[in-house]
Image (cartoon, rainbow, N blue to C red):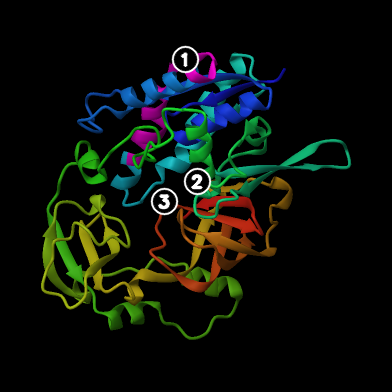
């Protein structure tokens, strides 16, 4: 009998994943990951992990499977939280959920599961795994989007490797969310009606500005409003001698100066803000709401523009360096000067958009057919062929 360790989070998705595996005849063990208890940084006045671990225990008892809690808070602080603070300090916007999957659930947690003698780990992610048989008898693993288009979570797993996928199962990937809740209710699982968690991966409820302010000190600076015509001018250029020169230009991060607009307010630190952000600016008196179009953490200035169609928000191309480039399917990796037509997204829940990949010395350009709003350094871009996620990278 194959042994599977399920990451029981105390939510409905992982509860049903454990139930389905047991029904399929696997020897199932439930493991709850405790990822935080650093008193120097308060995540929340509530303590959701206690409630969650208790719910996970009740589910395990109901299913009649062994259960234990593993404390991964040291690794979580080093690999996720410290990284987040460093990135925000540099004016970038990290994605902790993608990192948590790569560094914690499918690395530290996976190793613990294998030490327990498991053949696989399983999670409650809405995605699927495909297996291609190669001529030499080996197997290639595919990361496929979940059957529930509204809940597809393949983007969050965009950094997984072939070795990690080989040892992973996604039991609810073929199901719709309402079906998952129905299965939980039919089997009297305590999590059947529990709301989905909205916080940082496995931490719980957190408001990012308060979280960041505990390590990144407030620093007063100015908010500048840049007129649309100045931003437009910043992005216009006529001809290019080569495609690579054009891509280098269209992927360039615009640079603004104080003289490009007027000062309309003050802020408590440019490192607390991210491109595309609207909330927290507290500037009134404009015809349309202000959006952050750029931050300058060196000079501590936030540049903004009126309305969600402001040209300063939009860019067609982004760049991923070789160091930050990852192929879920290494057999499909591009060589220098090769191109590939793909569908891509730069954030979770964004509809997939047509794009072309261009491999050059030092990295890869992702050139979208349509301009994208708030392409943000530090976030992940993921690209797909049909319903398969084949690669990803950190936006430079």
- Residue 248 drawn above or below residue 103: below
Q: Can residue 52 be seen in this snapshot?
A: yes
Q: What is the CA distance from the residue labelled 1 to the residue labelled 3?
A: 35 Å
Labelled pair 1, 3 in contact (Cβ < 8 Å): no
Q: Secondary structure at mark 3?
A: loop
Q: Looking at the picture, how far across and down is residue 390, in whole percent?
A: 64, 51
Between 27 and 261, the one lying in front of the other is 27
Q: Looking at the picture, how far across and down is residue 64, in whole percent?
A: 54, 15
Residue 36 falls left or right of residue 217: right
Residue 173 falls left or right of residue 312: right
Let me know if residue 182 is in the magenta part: no
Magenta residues, dominant SS class: helix
- Binning the other alpha carbons within 10 Å of mark 2 as few (below 14), some (14 to 19) or many (20 upward) gives few
- Residue 141 drawn above or below residue 316: above
Q: Which residue is mark 1?
A: 68
Q: Which residue is mark 2?
A: 178
Q: Which residues are magenta?
A: 61-84
Q: Secondary structure at mark 2?
A: helix
């Amino acid at each position: 009998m194959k042994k599977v360790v399920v990451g029981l989070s105390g939510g409905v998705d992982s509860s049903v994943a454990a139930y389905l595996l047991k029904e399929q005849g696997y020897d199932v063990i439930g493991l709850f990951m405790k990822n935080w208890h650093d008193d120097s940084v308060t995540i929340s006045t509530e303590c959701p992990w206690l409630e969650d671990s208790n719910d996970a225990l009740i589910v395990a008892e109901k299913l009649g499977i062994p259960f234990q809690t593993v404390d991964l808070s040291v690794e979580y602080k080093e690999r996720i939280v410290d990284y987040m603070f460093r990135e925000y300090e540099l004016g970038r916007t990290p994605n902790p959920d993608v990192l948590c999957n790569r560094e914690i659930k499918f690395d530290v947690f996976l190793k613990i599961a294998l030490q327990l003698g498991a053949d696989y780990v399983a999670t409650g992610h809405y995605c699927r795994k495909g297996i291609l048989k190669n001529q030499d008898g080996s197997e290639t693993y595919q990361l496929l989007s979940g059957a529930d288009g509204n809940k597809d979570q393949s983007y969050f797993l965009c950094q997984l490797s072939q070795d990690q996928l080989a040892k992973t199962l996604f039991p609810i990937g073929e199901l719709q969310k309402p079906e998952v809740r129905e299965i939980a209710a039919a089997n009297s699982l305590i999590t059947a009606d529990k709301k989905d968690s909205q916080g940082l991966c496995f931490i719980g409820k957190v408001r990012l500005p308060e979280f960041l302010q505990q390590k990144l000190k407030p620093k007063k600076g100015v908010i500048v409003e840049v007129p649309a015509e100045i931003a437009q001018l910043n992005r216009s250029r006529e001809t290019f001698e080569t495609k690579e020169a054009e891509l280098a230009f269209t992927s360039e991060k615009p640079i603004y100066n104080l003289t490009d607009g007027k000062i309309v307010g003050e802020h408590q630190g440019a490192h607390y803000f991210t491109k595309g952000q609207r909330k927290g600016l507290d500037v009134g008196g404009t015809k349309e709401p202000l959006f952050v179009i750029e931050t300058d953490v060196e000079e501590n200035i936030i540049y903004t523009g009126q309305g969600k169609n402001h040209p300063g928000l939009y860019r067609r191309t982004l760049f991923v360096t070789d160091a930050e480039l990852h192929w879920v399917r290494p057999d499909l990796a591009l060589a220098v000067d090769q191109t590939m037509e793909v569908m891509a997204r730069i954030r979770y829940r964004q509809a997939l958009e047509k794009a072309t990949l261009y491999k050059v010395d030092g990295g890869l350009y992702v050139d979208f057919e349509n301009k994208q709003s708030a392409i943000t350094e530090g976030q992940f871009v993921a690209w797909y062929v049909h319903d398969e996620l084949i690669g990803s990278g950190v936006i430079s």
